[in-house]
Amino acid sequence: MGELTIITTRPERALVTLFGRPQPPEGVSVVTTSQAIGNIPNGSRCFAIWFEPRKYRSSVEWAWIMRRERGGVVGLELEDLHAFGLFAHHARGVPQPAPRSTSMGHLPAVTSVRAAGGEVSA
């Protein structure tokens, strides 16, 4: 696995959403099957993104929920999410947003967010 593992049922849409292009950047791998999710080693940095309504969870999403419950995968911090935004802006040729403080150490690692038709979980 790469330095970051993206878990999704719609890889191209996830990559465009996160990175502004349909190919993963160097160090990023994409997992799309329940079996591959079960084989994610402890210590892996993972980020899941779902585009289906929550009431229609796929077998892949259920596999991710069970893998997270086993423990050992690493969620992402606010700095990681900001880096996604910068990467996507650069890939799309959009000027980068002004730097912002992400020193919110009191917040836990991101585990699940649903917005704009997609759910993101780590």
Image: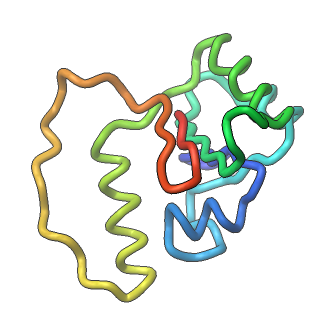
Q: Residue furthest bottom?
A: 93
Left or right side of 73 for 7: right
Name the residue: 44% across, 80% down: 91
Name the residue: 36% across, 76% down: 89
Q: Position of residue 62 (x, y in %)?
A: 77, 26
Name the residue: 70% across, 53% down: 30
Q: How is the image coloured?
A: rainbow
Q: Position of residue 12 (x, y in %)?
A: 70, 67
Q: Residue furthest top?
A: 70
Q: Position of residue 48 (x, y in %)?
A: 61, 41
Above or below, 1 against 105 in this view is below
Name the residue: 73% across, 32% down: 55
Q: Position of residue 92 (x, y in %)?
A: 43, 84
Which residue is more in the foreground, 42 or 52? 52
> How many marks do you count on the picture?
0
Left or right side of 91 for 38: right
Q: Considering the image in quadrants, where does the N terminus appear?
A: top right
User: Quadrant of residue 110 in the image?
Assistant: top left
